[in-house]
Amino acid sequence: MTKWKLGVVVLIVFVGGVLVGALATKGTQRTASRSGAAGDLATEVASTDVDVPPGPTATDPTLAPTTTATPRDICNGRDLEYAGSASSPADVLELSLTDDLISDFGDLSRSDVEKAFGRPIKYFADGGGSLSIVRDDLGSLSFRQRYVPGETGSPVVEFLGNEPLLDESRELWLSYRVKFEPGWEFVQGGKLPGLAGGRYASGGSGADGSDGFSARLMWRPDQKLVVYAYHPDRPTRFGEDFPLCGNVPVGAWFSVTQHVVLNSGPDAFDGVVEVWIDGEKRQSRSDVRWRIDGSFGVDQFVYSSFYGGDTSDWSPSTTTYAQFGAFKVATSASGVDFGLS
């Protein structure tokens, strides 16, 4: 090869190497630039003061449900938080069932319930001896109730305290567990425990906005639950259904957690009712006017359970049974359970 041809080849190789190096350097700089931008963005996001309302989390054993890591709103398929003073210290009233209260149907007295409740009660209906206290299959003590068919349902079992629970406030929480025993029939529906305030509203009367309200739960056909709400804006004189998403099991325990916050003023439709089943939110409303004046708070736990309506199709075809336990009433979420414990 001649000298000039050799020189041209060397020059081409040299120039090519310079170009490759330059491109590599430029690519590295571009990558570094992108990494730097991403880092800056991450730093900016991390330093942003985001106001996130408190809620149950898997890292907080006090608030976390025992059955799910993070509560889910199964209605909308998203993670959720809850309204109100969720993480503030709680005053707690826990229904205390003890071995000396174990009883058969017909043996449980008003004084036994008062001992478990820790206070006098102003109303007690035992459904003709339809309530007992048993040791359940979880090893705990629970109420066991029988539901004997009647003309329009079953005998009423119901009791509530004769004085406000804890403080008479805008907000209260309730949790308990339920087991509909095998053979349970949902028919048209029936009542379950819930929260109330002022004069307990039921039976198609009360809740005119100045006297009181109630927010018991109900079972409905097809293994559904609802909040059965007595509030002044309900469409009829009876309670209004606020349906829960999903359904509930028969033959297995499930937990109920309820949260009620009264509206902030007479014309404010900002009252809250929320319900979790086994740590999953099934109902959430923040548009309820529970009261028109401020003469009462949310201050009552109501044990209420019976098949009930005004026609024969509300009655089960045979005697059925359910169990209830682990009742807790609290002024914030830290005092109640989100799941079986």
Image (tube, rainbow, N blue to C red):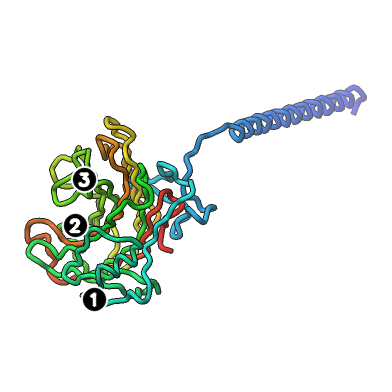
Q: Residues within 10 Å of mark 1 (few under 14, many from 20)?
A: some
Q: Which residue is disc 3 drawn over?
A: 230
Q: Which residue is disc 2 drawn over?
A: 221
Please tell me which residue is depicted at 22% across the width and 59% down the height of the picture.
123
Which residue type does callout 1 highlight?
A: Asp
Please state the horizontal and vertical placement of residue 188, each as a whole percent of the image.
15, 57
Label 2's element? loop
Q: Is residue 193 visible?
A: no
Q: Is residue 110 visible?
A: yes
Which residue type does callout 3 highlight?
A: Tyr
Against 235, is 125 above or below? below
Horizontal side of residue 255 vs 215, given as left or right: right
Residue toward you, 90 or 247: 90
Label 1's element? loop
Residue 127, by quadrant, is bottom left
Q: Residues within 10 Å of mark 3 (few under 14, many from 20)?
A: many
Whether label 3 touches label 1, CB < 8 Å: no
Please state the horizontal and vertical placement of residue 228, each as a whole percent of the image.
22, 49
N-term mark: 3 or 1: 1
Residue 209, by quadrant, is top left
Residue toward you, 138 or 27: 138
Residue toward you, 183 or 308: 308
Please tell me which residue is depicted at 10% across the width and 66% down the height of the picture.
150
CA separation, marks 2 and 3?
20 Å
CA separation, marks 3 and 1?
33 Å
Horizontal side of residue 107 vs 277, given as left or right: left
Which residue type does callout 2 highlight?
A: Pro
Q: Which residue is disc 1 drawn over?
A: 107
